Image: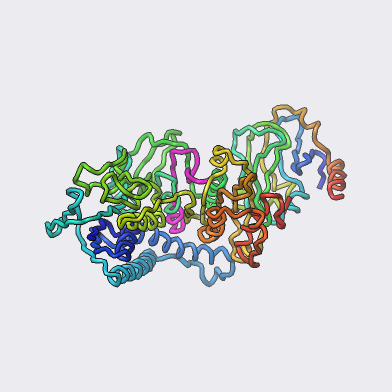
Amino acid sequence: MKAVVIGGGPAGYVAALSLKRLGAEVLLIEREELGGTCLNKGCIPTKTIIHSLGLLEKIKNQKIINEINYPNISVDLQTLMQKKDNVVDTQKKGLLMLLKHSGVKIIKSEAELINPQTVFLKETSEKIQADRIIIATGSKPAKLPMLSFDGKKILSSDDLWNLKKIPESITIIGAGAIGCEFAWIFHLLGSKVTLIELMPKILPMEEEDISKEVEKLFKKRKIQFYTGVRIQDLKIFDNSVQITLSNEKILTSEIVLVSVGRAFNTDCIKTSEIKLGNKKEIIVNERMQTNIENIFAAGDVIGNWLLAHVAYKEGEIAAKNAMGDNKKMDYTVIPSTIFTVTEVASVGLKEADAIQKGFNVKKGIFPFRAIGKAHVVGEIEGFIKVIADKDSDIIVGAHIVGADASELIHELAMAVKFKIKINDLKELIHSHPTLSECIGEAIKDISGEAIHKIK
Amino acid sequence: MSLENYKFHKEHTWVKISGKTKKVKVGISDYAQESLGDIIYIELPEIDNHVEADTEMAEIESTKTSSPVIAPVSGTIVEINEELIDHPEIINEDPYGKGWIAVIEMDNPRELEDLMDYEDYESYLEEERE
């Protein structure tokens, strides 16, 4: 069996490794860098930078530094970028080794699918025949209808990596995960940040209370934001960009970041036989199969969750099914995380969705500030909210805003995924002093039994 | 400090009446700041917003907990204490003076009759403690 995978990001490389493990002869084609957006321009670089800048911020907040001796501890952009590059390079070398050792053949080239059995390599003008093809070409920053990226003042999240100096001010259009993460990064770098969002709240996809808390965290840090606003007018001058909002507010900044979503990389599909959706995403069934039997697709390009860990799973499922298995992708329990002022993580249903689905909703809420470890680490903001169904005595959703939310969410994801009874969950002892204690208390709060909750 | 012109709401907020004007300063009581502990943030109401008596008009965060500030009277917010944005700890230091939160222009001054004077508030606190 000969298989070709187009795209070496999270979906593509996992698909390639899985195919190989199942005995296929595998060719992985990548036009840019292995690891895709996630490793080169997304998850890994942004988190490296947020972690480094966040560390500095935390040290300052600990109030243990003699500010007279160290008045000007600050970040050097070049050194920061060097650190980011080192992390990315290490990961990339590891990935390359993993693929080579497993026997996946890697080709660096632009590829086109010219018919359901043939991939055309642009570099060498070679035509490759394959029994199975997995398309994992990913996504790129979407632009606003009337506003193209110019790489100088109107930037995409990809363009930001080319900045040579920290801008004095930045307006960020779109307060989703990417917009909020960059708002925090530029705030920590010392830029004046203004965030604008069309929807009535920032992080529009998150639980109501979580968005509200993040808005508060932004307000506390004087990160300006406007929600429920449209752009009425945008003027580009030599040294600035001026945006007029629908509420008549005029914003002037050195640069603008447009983070309004992602567009799908399907230009490489040169045959009209494969079905695409309205946004040019590839349509697949729950087995990750396109309308053409031997062609599968996975990751961002199918326009679904746009998360690397979902892409991993989709890549694996696409590979298994390409090799004759019959696996289905289950999207019901997917943890997701955002790294902003403090971390945000969620899994399962939001409260409003749970009510709408007819669950007998009971919730438990517990603030981090009520547990010792939060004070030890100096991060007392935020809370954990769990959404439970009283009738079945299980948790159907969980939402965290606070320190280490991205790690903490998995205990709750396990509870949601395996439908563990709340009555049993309550009995789990959490080690002290840890932030995980907050999970135990939030679960107990469902029945009003949280020990450390001030009434 | 004389609290003669102050009236108290059972949710531990106060209004300070000065003369016959419908504009009153509001804040939280000494008992409230004491129970909250070190105050680290206050989400102030917005000027021109209307608030209803007995409902949340602001939110205070301390190192221990976060708690709503309940409006003692209904009316329009005409002034806020901007000092508190950078120095919320002023509420701990001087809850009846510099730690005022906002000025409300009352819809109906008769609502003041529902509030307690300081002596009544003190005995109310005694009862609460029991």
Residue A186, given in percent of the width and then of the height, sits at: 43, 55
Vertical placement of residue A235 versus A422, above or below: above
Give whichever of A56, B7 is nearer the camera.
A56
Give whichever of A237, A408 is nearer the camera.
A408
Q: Which residues are magenta?
A: A183-206
Q: Quadrant of residue A129?
A: bottom left
Q: In the drawing, does residue A64 fall left or right of residue B123?
A: left
Residue at figure coordinates x 43%, y 38% from the top left = A198
Q: Quadrant of residue A174?
A: top left
**Residue A152 can be seen, yes or no:** yes
Residue at figure coordinates x 36%, y 58% from the top left = A316
Q: In the drawing, does residue B113 fall left or right of residue A88?
A: right
**Residue A160 can be seen, yes or no:** no
* Colour convention: rainbow
Residue furthest to the left: A125
Give whichever of A144, A366 is nearer the camera.
A366
Q: In the drawing, does residue A259 fall left or right of residue A437?
A: left
Residue B123, given in percent of the width and then of the height, sits at: 87, 44
Decide whether residue A316 is among the magenta residues: no
Q: In the drawing, does residue A453 fall left or right of residue A47?
A: right
Residue A187, given in percent of the width and then of the height, sits at: 46, 55
Residue at figure coordinates x 36%, y 48% from the top left = A257
Decide whether residue A202 is among the magenta residues: yes
> How many marks are shown on the rendered structure?
0
Give whichever of A205, A278 is nearer the camera.
A278
Residue A398, given in percent of the width and then of the height, sits at: 56, 51
